[in-house]
Amino acid sequence: MKAHVSSILLGVRDMDRAKEFYTEGLGWKIQSDFGISVFFASDGASPVGFYSREGLAAQVGTGQEGSGFSGLVLTYVVRSQGRVDEIMAEAEKAGATVLKPAGALPWGGYGATFADPDGYIWSLGYSDQGTDQPYAE
């Protein structure tokens, strides 16, 4: 198996709320809306989509309830500290929960962390240490 993710599906409790957060709040564009699932335009990266939490849990053979830190963090690397600040402002305005305000990171970078309305954690980061980083934008 290769170190590759073909798509990322997030199980959401309220499809309309999730779509509003990501489209109106963060400016994502819907590529396909199948009613029970939604996929966003990915600009060549792994596509991100939503599925009802109950339906996704059933599809993969597990229960839908969970609590606490899941061990999964979605990372979004940008090219400037200012962009980290801009995205955090957009996310907070859209209803995200700020978990870690923007600031210096222990390894020398700059970043921040928020949780979307379903609790999925997004880690924003910037570092001028290298040029081969997996930039999202």
Image: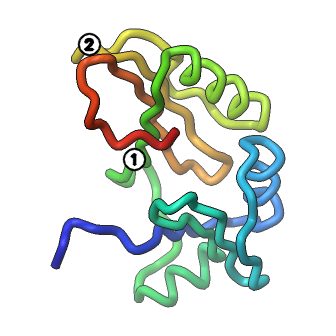
> x, y (%) of residue 3?
21, 66
* Closer to the eye: label 1 or 2: 2
**Which one is in front, 39 or 62?**
39
**Which one is in front, 61 or 123?**
123
* Circle on res. 42: none
Q: SS at mark 1?
A: loop
Question: Where is mark 1, residue-wise?
Answer: 73
> x, y (%) of residue 120?
53, 50
Q: Amino acid at mark 1?
A: Val
Q: Residue at x 42, y 35 (%)?
A: 77
In the drawing, does residue 33 fall left or right of residue 1? right
Q: Residue at x 68, y 79 (%)?
A: 37
> Quick check: 105 above or below 51?
above
Q: Farthest residue to the front: give it.
A: 131
* Circle on res. 108: 2
Q: SS at mark 2?
A: loop
Colour option used: rainbow
**Which one is in front, 88 or 99?**
88
Q: Quadrant of the N terminus?
A: bottom left
In the drawing, does residue 92 fall left or right of residue 65? right
> x, y (%) of residue 46?
45, 64
The CA span between labels 1 and 2 is 19 Å
